[in-house]
Image: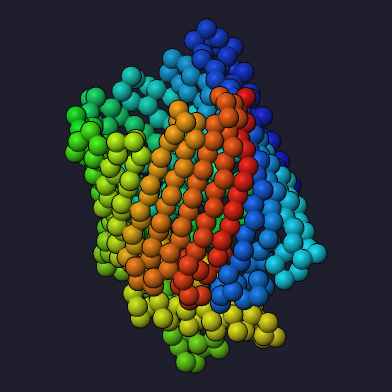
């Protein structure tokens, strides 16, 4: 309820700003308002693993119905731009795995993105607000982005939750841009993300963007309050009309991820610690990739990712040992709470991916006058031999209505990354724009 009131207050305040702006100069304002209505049904098959023993930890449901209204509002003036993306959603879940008679529903209202940008000169402007700030050509992850570990590429119909940024942008020339970025608040006004993250610390970055005839590149230096510096960047080169090559990487000095620590005296055999939070040890994360357009206009992409912050074989073995110990004690009368805490840490240890070596193969094809498109994606963890296959199909019935289906299948042992939660899931729905 508190989050809904906050969202309502934000939207009302923005409405007052809009009214004031319009009263100053109606003729100088360009207004664009449109909305999308997204609805889908989803089904998922859970995987039996130590991450979610008997579904007692995550409490996943077999079926879900989702309806969401996504208004997008923008006002562009001579020296300012206002953007608002409020979201209103309703979810209904039924048939909890292990407890078929259980069901649950939730409605939500939040501001996923919204910012005010002011231009002091034609080459210098500033903005403050909530954004999903993404860049780069990669599909698997974006190592050079210190603000978001998820680029949303594998969940095309689910929006990445925005964070609160203050930005200063300077454009000294057509080919060069300087940006100063501060992530001041964690954002997230959804009901399930309303609790403040006690681990959140502000991050600041200097970003330099360059644009050439057949390339674009970016360099970035960021720092988290209390330490953890990151150097990063990406480069994208058009090799030919058909071939695009790219590279995205970062070097992290220290990180806040959790690493397993075995301890025979611990009731669960060990714990998880931020081993490299205060160190100056540098670790490399990088993606090298290429995409090639075939004669039938289909695009084939291949990416290799090396994650230097991920677990090596010894750390992975300790991770799964501690996860299994937590699963075995989830109902223990004394250590059950500690076991739940450990499973929460193994669920999200703060790594962009769990292990070190990954390969992505993607095939995208549009046909029927671009009305029908589908994407096949295979992601392989080369360290534990687990795979995730994704098929995305979208059909534009007309200019307003799109029908889609998104399916995932995972393969691997229960003590592997892609087989720790779901073995398969399917989402079928439609999106109507008006």
Q: Position of residue 173 (x, y in %)?
A: 23, 25
Q: Nearer the viewer, residue 114 or 246?
A: 246
When asked about the image quadrant of residue 367, the answer is: top left
Q: Position of residue 395 (x, y in %)?
A: 54, 35
| Residue at the (70%, 48%) spot, across then down | 65
Judge left or right: residue 131 versus residue 135: right
| Residue at the (48%, 19%) spot, across then down | 76
Is there any visible trace of residue 208 in the rendered image? no
Residue lying at the far right in this picture: please name it. Answer: 101
| Residue at the (62%, 84%) spot, across then down | 329
Q: Nearer the viewer, residue 20 or 307?
A: 307
Judge left or right: residue 310 versus residue 391: left
Residue lying at the far bottom in this picture: please name it. Answer: 265
Q: Nearer the viewer, residue 430 or 193?
A: 430
Is there any visible trace of residue 170 in the rendered image? yes
When asked about the image quadrant of residue 298, the answer is: top left
Number of numbered markers: 0
Relative vertical location of residue 367 with respect to residue 346 in this rendering, above or below: above
| Residue at the (56%, 24%) spot, across then down | 399
Judge left or right: residue 68 versus residue 293: right
Judge left or right: residue 421 versus residue 330: left
Q: Position of residue 54 (x, y in %)?
A: 65, 75
């Amino acid at each position: 309820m508190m989050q809904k009131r906050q969202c309502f207050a934000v939207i009302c305040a923005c409405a007052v700003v809009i009214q004031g702006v319009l009263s100053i100069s109606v003729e100088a304002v360009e207004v664009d308002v449109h909305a999308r209505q997204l609805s889908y049904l989803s089904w998922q098959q859970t995987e039996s693993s130590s991450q979610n023993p008997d579904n007692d930890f995550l409490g996943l449901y077999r079926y879900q119905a989702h309806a969401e209204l996504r208004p997008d509002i923008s006002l562009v003036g001579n020296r300012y731009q206002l953007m608002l993306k409020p979201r209103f959603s309703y979810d209904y879940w039924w048939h909890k795995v292990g407890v078929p008679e259980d069901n649950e529903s939730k409605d939500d209202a939040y501001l996923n993105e919204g910012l005010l940008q002011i231009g002091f000169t034609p080459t210098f402007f500033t903005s403050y607000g909530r954004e999903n700030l993404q860049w780069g050509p990669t599909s698997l992850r974006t190592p050079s982005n210190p603000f978001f570990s998820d680029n949303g590429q594998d969940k095309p119909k689910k929006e990445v939750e925005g964070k609160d940024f203050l930005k200063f942008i300077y454009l000294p020339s057509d080919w060069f841009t300087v940006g100063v970025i501060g992530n001041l608040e964690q954002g997230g006004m959804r009901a399930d993300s309303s609790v403040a993250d006690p681990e959140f610390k502000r991050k600041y970055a200097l970003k330099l963007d360059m644009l050439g005839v057949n390339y674009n590149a970016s360099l970035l230096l960021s720092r988290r309050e209390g330490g953890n510096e990151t150097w990063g960047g990406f480069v994208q080169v058009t090799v030919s009309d058909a071939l695009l090559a790219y590279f995205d990487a970062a070097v992290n000095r220290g990180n806040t991820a959790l690493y397993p620590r075995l301890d025979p005296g611990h009731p669960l055999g060990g714990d998880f610690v931020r081993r490299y939070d205060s160190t100056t040890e540098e670790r490399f994360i990088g993606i090298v990739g290429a995409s090639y357009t075939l004669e039938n206009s289909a695009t084939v992409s291949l990416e290799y990712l090396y994650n230097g912050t991920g677990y090596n074989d010894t750390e992975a073995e300790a991770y799964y040992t501690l996860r299994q110990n937590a699963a075995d004690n989830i109902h223990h009368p004394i250590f059950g709470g500690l076991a739940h805490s450990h499973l929460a840490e193994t669920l999200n240890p703060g790594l962009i991916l769990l292990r070190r070596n990954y390969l992505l193969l993607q095939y995208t094809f549009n046909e029927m006058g671009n009305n029908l498109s589908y994407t096949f994606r295979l992601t392989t963890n080369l360290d534990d031999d687990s795979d995730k296959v994704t098929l995305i199909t979208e059909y534009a019935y007309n200019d307003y209505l799109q029908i889609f289906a998104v399916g995932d299948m995972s393969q691997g042992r229960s003590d592997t990354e892609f087989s720790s939660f779901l073995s398969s899931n399917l989402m079928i729905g439609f999106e109507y724009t008006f």
